[in-house]
Image (cartoon, rainbow, N blue to C red):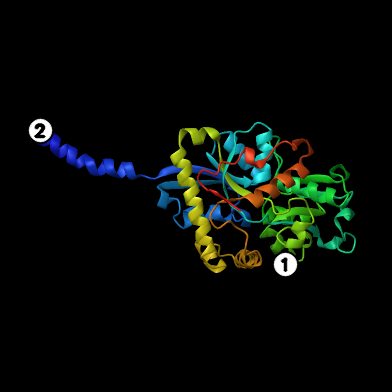
Amino acid sequence: MRRLFGLLLLSWLPVAAALAQAPVRVVLSAPGPHNLSYLPVDLIPRIGADAAEGLRLQILHTGGGGVALKNLANRNADFVVAGEPAQMSAKLNGADVVTIAAVNDAPLFVLMVRADLKGKVKRVADLRGHVLGVNTSTQSSKTTSQQLMEVVLRSDGVKPEEVTIVSAGQSWEEQSAVLNGKVVDAVMGDEPYATRLQEAKQVFFLVNLGEPAGAARIPGGRFLHAALATRAEVIARSPELVEKMVRALRRSLQWIASHSPEEVMTALDIRAPAERDTFIKALKAYPHSFSHDGRFSSRQLGDTDVFFRAATPGAQGFSVNDMVNDRWAGRGD
């Protein structure tokens, strides 16, 4: 009997070891796929950054940061990557959201105008009375795209109520359709879709935040855009899981910093020539798109406060530092 028990124990040990080493499934929600600002998220499973930390990442893609944050709130996901201003909006509306790592080093938004309006729209003030598209918002948070649209309008003396703001989606297909159908006159859009629309001669750029001149024209124009976040209860319940998720993101960011745009496209398996070429062009045009290590920049957080207070006049006492936990990512200048 003892010999039989010993044999059974020996046969179970490899199974137990395999179970102990099985990767932990983690669900993360983010806009996409194939949005330049959120590219590090898509890369995590492609380069094995999750497996290296003992995780199996499932990405729940959405049409916008507001929807991704709703997935976090509804516990459809334990992690989210969304615009920091959208996270702040959700926090002000009572959401349990804690920012734990930086993804972007610069906000890659472009205010683009329908090509047939060239000559009629020469500056932001000329958009008064027009229909403008932003990414989808929810009742619980206002997307970064809409906040930015309103700040850009105010910076040129246009009140948000003097225009009509509608949802234009957050993909090339959606934005191309609403522009071609003349549903909107302009869109506060993302890269690489903006570059692709420009190359197709569907739009011209009016304000480009990816360029220093564009960022300088609005308050806090170098704010933190995409950032990794979770719920406070996840931190309390599984701090080791949070640490692993931050490390997986950091692996992705460091991989991007050490590889060419062409290698990034190969890793993502983006083969359609138009999409691949536009992505490569955008990555080369914005070489400082991403954080290299996920650390929070004090300068960037300061800009985020300036921007959010300009976008949300009633939030003057609220700071991004009220919702940042830099325990795992760290902080720098």
Q: Secondary structure at mark 2?
A: helix
Disc 1 + disc 2, Cβ < 8 Å: no
Q: Position of residue 322 (x, y in %)?
A: 63, 37
Of residue 114 and residue 212, the one placed in the foreground of this image is 212
Q: Which residue is mark 1?
A: 199
Q: Quadrant of residue 85?
A: top right
**Circle 1 sits in a helix, a strand or a loop, which is it?**
helix
Residue at point 59% right, 41% down? 324
- Circle 1 crowding by C-alpha within 10 Å: few under 14, some 14–19, many from 20: few
What residue sits right under mark 2 in the picture?
2
Q: With 320 as the anchor, is 207 left or right in this view?
A: right
Q: As drawn, is 208 to the left or to the right of 192?
A: right
Q: How many marks?
A: 2
Residue 173 lies in quadrant: bottom right
- Residue 222 circle label: none
Q: Residue at x 44, y 42 (%)?
A: 25
Q: Which quadrant: the N terminus?
A: top left
Which percent across, then down, holds residue 147?
Answer: 75, 45
In this view, 186 is above or below 237? below
Crowd tier of the residue under label 2, counting other residues whose Cα lies within 10 Å: few below 14, some 14–19, many 20 or above: few
Pick whichever, 19 or 115, lies toward us.
19
Three-letter amino acid code of the residue under disc 2:
Arg
Q: Label 1 to label 2, Cα distance in Å?
A: 76 Å
For badge 1, the amino acid type reads Glu
Which residue is located at x 52 percent, y 39 percent?
78
